[in-house]
Image (cartoon, grey):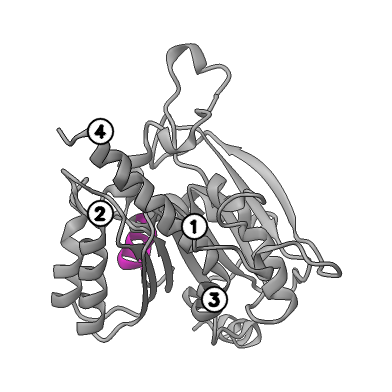
Amino acid sequence: MQPIAWIFLTAAASFAADEEYTLGPDSQVQPGVPRGKVTQHTWTESKVFPGTVRDYFVYVPAQYDAKVPTAVMVFQDGHAYAKEDGEFRTTVVFDNLIHKKEMPPVIGIFINPGHIPRPDQVEKKDPPKDRFRASNRSIEYDTPSDAYVRFLLEEILPEVGKSYNLTQNPAGRASCGISSGGICAFTAAWERPDAFSKVLSHVGSFTNIRGGHIYPAKIRKTPKKPIRVFLQDGEKDLDNAHGNWPLANQDMAAALKFARYDYRFEFGKGGHNGKHGGAILPESLRWLWRDYKPAAAKESEAKGF
């Protein structure tokens, strides 16, 4: 066991490192910028993850045109990303960047992890108050398989697609997450690059929670896939029985570089949180969506490409 003083000093150092990351104007509500609409929903009919209940939020930009297949970005641990006064403030960033034409109109789907209610909760279908403690979160997020991306493609995207014109073009689909949600975002694109071509991972858990440590080796030995990856991590990130998060993310970046992927790695000083990722979210989104053209996507979809 580490001495109490050592633990306190380590936590203090991590806090001090995180303090240098602040939110810029693109993460603040700006006058004259049209605001997108956010609606909340509940999903209880999963066939991929039976018995689970989850809430999710859908953001639709003010510039949405139902005649045009619209890009879509899925966020794991959606509550953390959709919160307007949180570390990411994603909907505010979307509003500002879309208004400035620094990213295309994108529909955001902010999905919380599945939870299997206790017997006394079944009728209420109550998700846990702390979504990070959802009982099915690690199974869904940390498992390197196609289960979660099938859940997206077979359940959530078709459900949202009943109300909005979502693109079928993988170039117009992105996945994002923090911690276990970060590796989940990568797994979705890795398993189905024909459906998701863009990944944004914040302090991603590329460690041996459920076998995710295999990815650097797989990236090196698998033919290059058509995906773009943005990784963020910090030197004060976790180090525990599952692995060392900073080393795991550096290993991911080295493998992506070796395999000649279109990738970017931002390695800072912070810990296992969204402060650094939130501070650079506007730049991350500009980089991720830098060459996506909705008109070209509309034409290619019409031709069946």
Residue 141 % position (x, y): 35, 48
Asked if 128 appears above or below 239 in the picture, the reply is above
Earlier sequence position, callout 2 versus callout 4:
4
- Against 127, residue 177 (above or below) is below
For label 2, the residue is 144
> What residue lies at 43% left-to-right and 55% top-to-bottom?
16
- Report the magenta stretch's main SS: helix
In the image, which residues are magenta? 184-192
Residue identifier under label 3: 283
User: Of discs 2 and 4, which sits in the foreground?
Assistant: 4
Magenta stretch encompasses residue 230: no
| Contact (Cβ within 8 Å) of mark 3 with mark 1 | no
Horizontal and vertical percent for residue 120? Answer: 48, 11
* Amino acid type of the residue tagged 2 in the rendering: Pro
Foreground mark, 3 or 1?
Answer: 1
Q: Residues within 10 Å of mark 1 (few under 14, many from 20)?
A: few
